[in-house]
Image (spheres, rainbow, N blue to C red):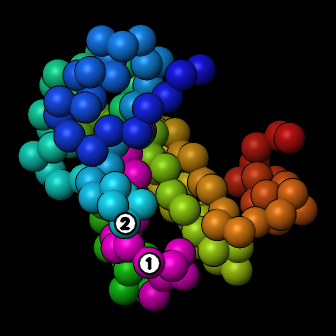
């Protein structure tokens, strides 16, 4: 599997032309990426035929989110799913495993790639088991 992170329409097209199997679409890579804007999402989904996974991240900085930020992320997940993304990708602090599982449920049947920031193997196993993923 060859996945590339793209933060522009041109990068997405170039990734596909270069043989990428899928994309992770985001904006503002200088701060490790945030959720792309609606126009970039729509243009990318229309322009490429490979699966597009969309980063769900409301801001730069740490990965501990407030309840207001989680509500924004829930709305972003629903919008991205309705737009036709193949999956969403999220980074979370390990202390928020329950909320990560909730986001995975909201994303269904669209795929959800949950990554725990600073997580060890036991934390990753616990999260995947809670989400119903066999390891």
Mark 1 Cα within 10 Å, few/some/many (few <14, many 20+)?
A: few
Q: Which residue is mark 1?
A: 61
Check whether the beta carbons of the residues at disc 2 and disc 1 lie within 8 A of each other.
Answer: yes
Determine which quarter of the picture holds residue 119.
bottom right
Q: Is residue 113 left or right of residue 106?
A: right
Q: Which residue is mark 2?
A: 31
Could you say where residue 73 lies in the image, as x and y percent from the top left?
A: 38, 68
Q: Main secondary structure of the magenta part?
A: loop
Report the residue at 44% width, 86% height from top. 67
Q: Secondary structure at mark 2?
A: helix
- Does residue 5 lie above or below 13 as drawn? below
Front residue of 80/123: it is: 123
Looking at the image, tell me whether mark 2 or mark 1 is earlier in sequence order.
2
Could you say where residue 61 lies in the image, as x and y percent from the top left?
A: 44, 78
Residue at the limit of the structure toward the right, as seen here = 122
Please tell me whether residue 55 belongs to the stretch shown in magenta.
yes
- Does residue 11 lie above or below 122 as drawn? above
Specify start and end residues of the magenta stretch as a single range: 53-66
């Amino acid at each position: 599997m060859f996945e590339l992170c793209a933060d522009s329409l041109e990068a997405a097209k170039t990734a596909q032309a270069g043989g990428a199997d899928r994309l992770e679409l985001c904006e503002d890579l200088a701060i490790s990426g945030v959720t792309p804007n609606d126009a970039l999402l729509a243009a990318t989904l229309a322009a490429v035929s490979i699966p597009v996974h969309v980063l769900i991240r409301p801001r730069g900085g740490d990965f501990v989110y407030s309840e207001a930020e989680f509500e924004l992320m829930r709305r972003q997940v629903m919008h991205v799913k309705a737009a036709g993304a193949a999956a969403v990708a999220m980074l979370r602090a390990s202390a928020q495993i329950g909320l990560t599982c909730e986001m995975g449920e909201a994303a269904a049947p669209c795929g959800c790639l949950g990554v725990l920031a600073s997580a060890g193997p036991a934390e990753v196993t616990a999260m995947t088991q809670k989400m119903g993923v066999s390891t």
